[in-house]
Every structure is written in C-alpha cells, then in structure tokens.
Image (tube, helix red, strand yellow):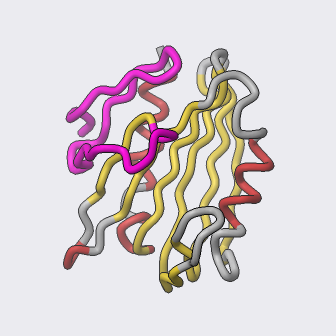
Amino acid sequence: MLHAEKIEIAGYSFSSPEKWVSSTPTSKMRKAQFSVPGENGKNAEVAFFHFGNGGAGGVKANVDRWMKQFEEAKDRTIKSTVIGEVPVTYAQAHGTFLSGSAFGPKTPKPNYALLAAIISGKNGSIFIKMTGPKETVEAQVSNMKKMVLNSLDK
C-alpha cells in the first residue's frame, strides 16, 4: 500500500511506498532521498533528481551513464511506456556497482542492482534512481512502478 511521505517535483506529486524512509539529500542535486530497508541491514538508496528542461542530458545519455557505474551491467533491461500522456523509461541492471562520486575513487559493491525511472515531464525530466543490494532492489520493482503510475495517472 502506498502512503508515507508526499513529495512534489516539477508539478508531479509522489507518495513514497510505506517502507521507504525519507532522509536528508546528500547533495544539492537531489530533490529527495530515501533509504529502503532490506533484510539484515542491506538497505538500498533512492534519489530523485530534476534539473529543468534539457538539464542532465536525455534518456539515453543517463541510462548509458548509469550502466557504466557497473563493472559489467548484467541483465540490462530498458523499457519505455506512456502513462497518461507522459513518456516513462524504466532501466534495470545488476552486477558489481562502482560506488563513488563521478570523478573520485570508486568502491566496488558486488551483487548490487539499479532500478531507475525517467519521467519525461513537461517541466523537464525527473530521474528516480535506486541502487543497493540486488535482493532489496528487486523486491521494490512493483512499489516503484506503482508510485510512478499513481503520480502520473491522474
């Protein structure tokens, strides 16, 4: 069931899934950030980004950059759909995630996964990116998709 925290980004209202815990964004680029509890403390992180119209490059550029954050992105899945009149692209992969800032040192995190949604809204794209232990991320696929659907299907 969806409830928990409501956030507004670029004219869309998102209700976070019930087990997602809001946290203070770790960078000014993030509009919102959540921790997603997993078994034995294996938490995932969700970050929401919005840079306005044309900001941060297009869908393909972002998906490509995210896939390069893995030593070898396995089971890459990229699917596009339209909800209401809004194009949405979902991306998934797993493998050894290279955690760290864009230009800093990387920490390899084996058996990690990515689940992302790019909402191509009228006020610019909204990027929702979850990374964390594979089992935690994969358990959240339906919750993320429901959250996106509910925010756009008005």
Q: Main secondary structure of the magenta part?
A: strand
Q: What residue is at 34 percent from the left and 26 percent from the top? A: 7
Which sits in the foreground, 38 or 28?
Answer: 28
Q: How many marks?
A: 0
Left or right? Give the position of 85 relative to 141.
right
Give the magenta-colored segment's residue range. 1-30
Image location of residue 43, percent across then percent down:
30, 67
Residue drawn at (55%, 76%) of the image: 97
Quarter holding the N terminus?
A: top left
Image height of 152 relative to 25, above or below? above
Residue 144, placed above or below residue 52: below
Point out residue 136 in the picture as x, y percentages from the top left corner.
36, 68
Closer to the camera in the image, 107 or 15: 107
What x and y, as percent, mark residue 64? 76, 58
Decide whether residue 145 is among the magenta residues: no
Q: Residue furthest front?
A: 104
Above or below, 84 against 54 in this view is above
Q: Residue at x 69, y 29 (%)?
A: 87
User: Would residue 8 be counted in the magenta stretch?
Assistant: yes
User: Residue 91 at x, y = what percent?
Assistant: 64, 54
Q: Is residue 126 above or below residue 116?
A: above
Q: Residue sitting at 60 percent across and 19 percent down?
A: 84
Left or right position of 84 against 53: left
